[in-house]
């Protein structure tokens, strides 16, 4: 009995501590459903072709051997070509075309079989011609099956597993069990058809199923591909690598018409074979290839021989089903066996169990005879038990091959070489049965088959010796552990400042993966297990870090052109500019490798945003401190006891890498969520002085300050020598501390310093905004956005609210006011004119200033008429109680000449929605260019819209593309929405806060 240490690998204790990454279980199920359909068609055709040939040619195995020989030869000659196509053609495209070829080939093969069944002379020229045509379609079927097997069972599974050995093993098990189930059920189904119906009916049924499943699989494989974005990402990596590699591009340009000699040369590509033979996993691949040179399985040859012994179709189908069941048992026991004793040892147990189970089969042929009851029991029982070891070994060896070629850039091409070896062994089997075609000669073929299986087991012993250093398992000594620890310590540690060559990287990667494999197989005596487990965990982390760094530096993204890298970097930093996150994406990217750091630093535009978000703390009187307002001497910065804060360090790095010319985008503000524990006020003050020295480069300024900080900032900005000639965008966000009186912010003093200002955005909280009629930027502003602004006494637009004369002429094209109090918005609309205005948005909370007298509703209309503008976009938020007051002015707006170019209308006034929709339907000439209509909607009487109103709106306004309804739900008919969508009108329902919306 083996010891506990011998039976329990050290890896088992650590696997439970590492949680697996969540995988799309629905996508896995969809993949298995698609694979089931494909495997069902393959196994059905495989069984049916041999069965009907045996029924037609009853006295010889030659036709079935010729068919098997030709299909296998096709697999040998074209399997590498199939792997090359999988490597070169997009993943989804190659699978789709393979499915079409597979189904059409099977359909034509069934048609040839039906024609043969109708023929009376089995050896006429016509019959042999049809048979050769059947062989051709069988070869085409074999090629398509090979392409699907490489693409889905090997390439897609490797990508979907995401580098997880456990997930890869499970996925392989699921696919193998699916294959085995189809191998069980498909022959039973074909046998049922042949016994129950006439000779042609089974072929008609099989042909119909083939056509139906073809359309199903083409659609289903697309669904599977969409469920796993990693497949598309892997394809994009391969495309990028191919585009940047001239050799790969040249290799991909191949002539369409290739001679047989060229195909043979491609199959015997010495470079690929030489690379494959040098891999440690080659011996494992060779061992499983020997298992294919055997007639001791339920293939066409064995079925033909058993039919000559007068075994019925039902009995043969049952025995084949029994073998498939035992094969399923083999796939079930594989995972626990592998986790218990390791992959290499589990493969040894599996293949040798197959050898021992075939001994009774040989006794059946050479001692008792296959027709004897005891001989038949030994024959079918031994073959059934041997399937456990066969399918277990097949599953283990497939995983070994996939793990060995995971990081290889041409893994599909090398995987196809194993299929080529398997097909060669299969070809030799058919050559053997062609020479030994008489049933009396079949026992000699079984002897050759047993010797081949035994040879495969012996080759796997050599693989074990090369992989593990020994054949028979013994507990590892402590010195083995120390040796692995030294090997791991000897691996070079890479960082962003070290650039090794690709050859060195590949060598280190293979070396580290071999060490990882040996470390996983390491087993120790039980008394020393707790001590070495801690050392093992430490070494395992170090080894995984090394492998990760090698893979990262050898990944295809390292070969991307610098221009593409710059675009990627720009996209990464665009979303997190105004942030105090010290793990800023750009700072993480430059730490990946020296190349990325050079590319990032050579692009000054990536660094042009200078963001300083400083902390603040409140005293008892709620007065906020300003750490950057300190006037400490500059010499204090250089004291070692006063380290620079991470925020300033990052800002300095951005300022330094932005160069001397690129316009700067500056954000300066406070954040109450940031602690002030390590703040050194002098650094903020001196850095602001440093920025102001470069004020001529400022193109955008964003500040988030209170009144005291704003005054201090203004004082620094008004110093001599500080100038802002190129600043075009100014954004201000401010707040008065609670408990203090309202005081006007002197925005006009600061904005007067910006002669080129075109975009102004002010977001005030409880402050008064001081912008007078003499405010200079009114003449050059193009975009004005005001939020929560107060204080009409400080705007000084119109001393008398009843005076409507124009006071301020502006060049504004966009005006937005959100949540501004009533008097502020009213004063703005009375006093300002904007001839260039194209976009006007007022709201929410505009309804407050319309709650007064009804004449106030004319302010929007009079503002538009007075400005003589042509609006393209209009947004209004009206209180629901003012619908009757506002409706007449809305009707006038539809007739205004200044609204003929209107494209978008947003109106938050639910009670008038039915009237508005009716007005737009009855007057298609009003707002004839309208594309988008967004309204607040109440789906209840009397404000509810019926389906007829929507159809009338779409019919009268074919240019209307989108109807937004701000509502919690709608209750339109299920047929209305699709009909409107097909006519070109989309219905979108949004929550009233606008954050969540969906298209019906």
Image (cartoon, rainbow, N blue to C red):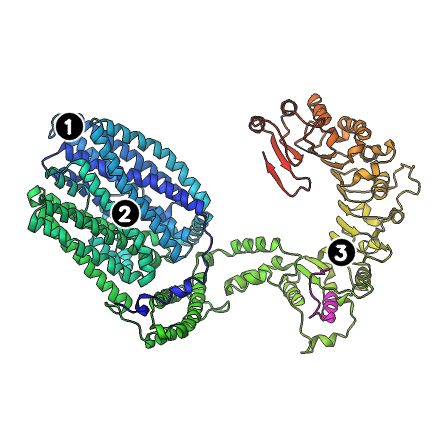
Work out whether mark 1 precedes mark 2 in sequence or the reverse, and give the earlier one. 2
| Residue 758 pos. (x, y %) | 75, 48
- Give the label, 3 or 1, closer to the camera: 1
Between the C-alphas of marks 1 and 2, the distance is 31 Å
Q: Position of residue 871 (x, y in %)?
A: 74, 34
Determine if residue 601 is in view. Answer: no
Can you identify the residue that label 1 sits on?
Answer: 126
Relative height, residue 40 to residue 699 (above, below): above
Magenta stretch, residue numbers: 669-690
Left or right: 244 as drawn, with respect to 734:
left
> Does residue 672 belong to the magenta stretch?
yes
The earlier-in-sequence mark between 2 and 3 is 2
Quadrant of residue 16 in the image? bottom left
- Helix, strand or loop for disc 3: loop
Q: Residue 414: percent from the left, percent from the top?
A: 31, 54
Identified at 25% across, 64% down, the residue is 464
Which residue matches tag 2? 79
**Is residue 854 in sight in this rendering?**
yes
* In this rendering, position of residue 155 left or right of residue 348: right
């Amino acid at each position: 009995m083996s010891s506990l240490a011998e039976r329990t690998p050290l890896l088992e204790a650590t696997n439970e501590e590492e949680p697996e990454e969540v995988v799309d279980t629905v996508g896995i199920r969809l993949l298995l459903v698609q694979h089931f359909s494909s495997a069902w068609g393959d196994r059905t055709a495989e069984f049916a072709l041999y069965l009907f040939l045996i029924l037609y040619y009853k006295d010889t195995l030659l036709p079935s051997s010729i068919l098997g020989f030709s299909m296998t030869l096709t697999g040998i000659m074209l399997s590498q070509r199939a792997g090359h196509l999988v490597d070169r053609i997009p993943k989804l495209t190659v699978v789709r075309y393979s499915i079409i070829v597979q189904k059409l080939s099977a359909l034509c093969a069934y048609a040839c079989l039906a024609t043969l069944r109708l023929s009376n002379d089995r050896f006429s020229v016509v019959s042999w011609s049809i048979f050769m045509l059947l062989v051709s379609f069988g070869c085409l079927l074999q090629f398509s099956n090979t392409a699907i097997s490489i693409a889905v069972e090997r390439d897609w599974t490797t990508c979907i597993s995401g580098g997880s050995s456990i997930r890869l093993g499970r996925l392989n098990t699921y696919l193998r069990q699916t294959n085995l189930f189809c191998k069980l059920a498909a022959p039973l189904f074909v046998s049922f058809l042949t016994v129950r119906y006439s000779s042609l009916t089974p072929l008609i049924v099989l042909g119909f199923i083939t056509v139906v499943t073809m359309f199903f699989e083409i659609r289903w494989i697309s669904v599977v591909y969409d469920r796993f974005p990693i497949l598309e990402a892997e394809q994009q990596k391969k495309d990028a690598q191919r585009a940047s590699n001239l050799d790969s591009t040249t290799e991909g340009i191949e002539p369409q018409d290739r001679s047989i000699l060229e195909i043979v040369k491609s199959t015997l590509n010495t470079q690929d074979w030489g690379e494959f033979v040098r891999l440690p996993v080659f011996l494992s691949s060779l061992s499983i290839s020997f298992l294919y040179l055997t007639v001791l399985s339920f293939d066409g040859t064995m079925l033909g021989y058993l039919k000559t012994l007068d075994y019925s179709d039902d009995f043969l189908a049952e025995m084949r089903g029994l073998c498939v069941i035992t094969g399923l048992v083999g796939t079930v026991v594989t995972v626990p066996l592998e986790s218990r004793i390791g992959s290499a040892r589990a493969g040894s147990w599996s293949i040798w169990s197959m050898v021992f189970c075939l001994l009774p089969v040989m006794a059946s042929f050479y001692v008792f005879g296959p027709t004897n009851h005891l001989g038949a029991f030994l024959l079918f029982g031994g073959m059934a038990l041997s399937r456990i070891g066969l399918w277990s070994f097949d599953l283990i060896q497939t995983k070994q091959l996939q793990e060995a070629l995971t990081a290889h850039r041409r893994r599909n091409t090398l995987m196809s070489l194993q299929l080529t070896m398997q097909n060669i062994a299969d070809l030799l089997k058919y050559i053997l049965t062609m020479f030994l075609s008489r049933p009396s000669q079949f026992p000699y073929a079984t002897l050759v088959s047993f010797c081949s299986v035994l040879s495969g087991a012996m080759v796997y012993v050599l693989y074990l010796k090369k992989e593990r250093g020994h054949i028979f398992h013994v507990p590892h000594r402590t010195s083995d552990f120390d040796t692995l620890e030294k090997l791991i310590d000897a691996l070079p540690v890479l960082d962003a400042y070290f650039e090794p060559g690709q050859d060195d990287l590949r060598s280190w990667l293979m070396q580290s993966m071999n060490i990882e494999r040996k470390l996983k197989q390491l087993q120790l005596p039980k008394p020393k297990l707790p001590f070495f487990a801690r050392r093992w965990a430490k070494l395992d982390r170090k080894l995984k870090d090394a492998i990760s760094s090698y893979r990262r530096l050898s990944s295809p993204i390292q070969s991307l052109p610098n221009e593409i890298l710059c675009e990627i970097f720009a996209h990464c930093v665009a979303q997190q500019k105004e942030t105090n996150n010290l793990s800023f994406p750009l700072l993480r990217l430059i730490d990946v490798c020296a190349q990325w750091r050079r590319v990032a630093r050579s692009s000054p535009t990536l660094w042009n945003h200078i963001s300083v978000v400083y902390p603040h703390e409140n005293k008892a009187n709620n007065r906020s401190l300003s750490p950057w307002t300190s006037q400490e001497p500059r010499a204090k910065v250089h004291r070692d006891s006063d380290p620079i804060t991470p925020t300033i360090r990052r800002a300095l790095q951005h300022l330094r890498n932005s160069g001397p010319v690129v316009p700067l985008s500056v954000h300066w503000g406070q954040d109450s969520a940031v602690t002030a524990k390590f703040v050194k006020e002098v650094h903020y003050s001196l850095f602001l002085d440093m920025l102001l020295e470069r004020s001529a480069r400022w193109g955008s300024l964003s500040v988030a300050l209170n009144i005291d900080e704003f005054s201090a900032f203004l004082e620094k900005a008004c110093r001599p020598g500080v100038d802002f000639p190129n600043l075009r965008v100014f954004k201000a966000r401010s707040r008065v501390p609670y408990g203090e009186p309202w005081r006007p912010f002197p925005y006009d003093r600061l904005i007067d310093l910006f002669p080129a200002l075109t975009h102004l955005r002010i977001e005030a909280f409880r402050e008064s905004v001081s912008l007078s009629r003499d405010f200079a930027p009114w003449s050059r502003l193009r975009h004005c956005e005001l939020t929560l602004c107060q204080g009409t006494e400080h705007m000084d637009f119109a001393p008398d609210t009843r005076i409507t004369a124009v006071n301020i002429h502006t060049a504004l094209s966009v005006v937005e006011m959100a949540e501004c109090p009533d008097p502020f918005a009213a004063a703005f609309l009375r006093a300002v004119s904007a001839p260039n205005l194209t976009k006007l948005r007022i709201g929410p909370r505009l309804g407050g200033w319309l709650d007064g007298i009804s004449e106030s509703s004319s302010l929007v209309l009079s503002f538009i008429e007075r400005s003589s503008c042509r609006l393209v976009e209009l947004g209004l938020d009206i209180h629901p109680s003012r619908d009757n007051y506002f409706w007449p002015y809305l009707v006038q707006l539809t007739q205004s000449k200044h609204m003929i170019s209107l494209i978008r209308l947003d109106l938050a006034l639910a009670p008038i929605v039915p009237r508005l929709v009716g007005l737009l339907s009855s007057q298609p000439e009003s707002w004839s260019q309208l594309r988008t209509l967004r309204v607040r909607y109440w789906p209840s009487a009397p404000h509810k819209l019926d389906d007829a109103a929507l159809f009338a709106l779409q019919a009268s306004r074919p240019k209307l593309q989108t109807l937004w309804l701000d509502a919690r739900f709608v209750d339109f008919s299920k047929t209305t929405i699709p009909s409107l969508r097909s006519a070109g009108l989309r219905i979108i329902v949004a929550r009233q806060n606008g954050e969540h919306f969906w298209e019906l």
